[in-house]
Image (cartoon, rainbow, N blue to C red):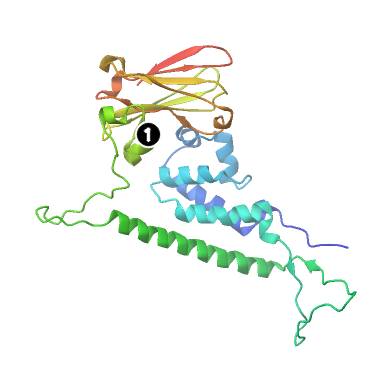
Amino acid sequence: MTGRRQPDPARTPECARLAEELRGLRAHTGLSMTALAQRTAYSRSSWERYLNGKALPPRHAVQELSELAGQRPQRMLALWELAELAWSGRAFTATPAKTPPNSPAAPPEAGETPRQFDTPAPGKTRTALTFLAVALAAAGVLAGVVWGLVGGVVWGVSGGGQRAAAPDTAPRCHGDGCAGRSPLLCGPSSRDVSAHSTPEGTWVKIRYSRACGAVWAVVWHSGVGDELRVSVPSEGSTPHAVVVRAFDTERMVPTPMVAARDVTAARVCLRSASTHRRTCFHA
């Protein structure tokens, strides 16, 4: 028995649309492919495949590029969900065969073989995907509404009608109160201070948040057991370190934060578990 051949996932409209939108975001950032690789957890060759539609990007890659372009990631993540369905083939799962026109549906007679299933026509699949896209888009709009309600516009009695900052974007700690805690508490207030590479091919970035008064480091393309340590010796702060585990080697791994009034005094050291080499960088 012959069945309908599943389309090449890279040629489906969903995957082509995602690649096109990703190229637009990359152009909006103004970053070269090399700079894009340095600013994210993915290599230049990986981004070339993602942007040309030759490979489905990880969900996190789509989110990172959206944020670099200054866009909320909800719409792009909805497109990614559709592309992932098409790429994995789950968009082409079997559905029951149609009942002949004007023929009432009836249960099979005793001893009769149940009706078989076949692959739906492409038009049916596109309709289902369109419905899913609308649903996901509606979810994104709802999320935006909730975001706005939570962030709120707060008018003070003596504030002259100035708009208050959304609570979920404001730093949640400062200075010594951030020491040893996750950089996520600083929200979007941080910036890259410097980026470095080691002879082993590992990348290290030093990040700083003036609003939080804290500095930390991020490592990627690392090996299992690598140790990254950040400190600000001139301020006598306690160094904080992170050790890369097996499940961390394919993503960016941040250290806890260290309080810092002056980021230029920050010092980051990476010890390679494979070569035992210790490489240090300054902001």
Q: Is residue 64 left or right of residue 161?
A: right
Name the residue rendered at 11%, 55% in the picture. 160
Q: Is residue 129 above or below residue 19?
A: below
Res 177 seen here: yes
- Residue 271 placement, left or right of 247: left
Could you say whether the residue bearing mark 1 is in a helix, strand or loop?
Answer: helix
Among all residues in the image, which is located at the extreme front? 110
Residue indicated by mark 1:
183
Q: Residue at x 55, y 18 (%)?
A: 200
Q: Position of residue 172 (x, y in %)?
A: 29, 39
Q: Between residue 248 and residue 46, name the one nearer to us.
A: 248
Give the total number of marks visible in the rendering: 1
**Residue 205 screen position, x and y as percent:** 42, 27
Q: Quadrant of residue 1?
A: bottom right
Quadrant of the rendered image containing residue 152? bottom left
Identity of the residue furthest to the left in this view:
158
Q: State the quadrant of the C terminus.
A: top left
Name the spot of residue 157 as percent of width and height, x first. 11, 56
Residue 154 lies, in percent from the top left, at 21, 56
Is 273 drawn above or below residue 248 in the view shown?
A: above
Q: Is residue 206 visible?
A: no
The residue type indicated by label 1 comes to Pro
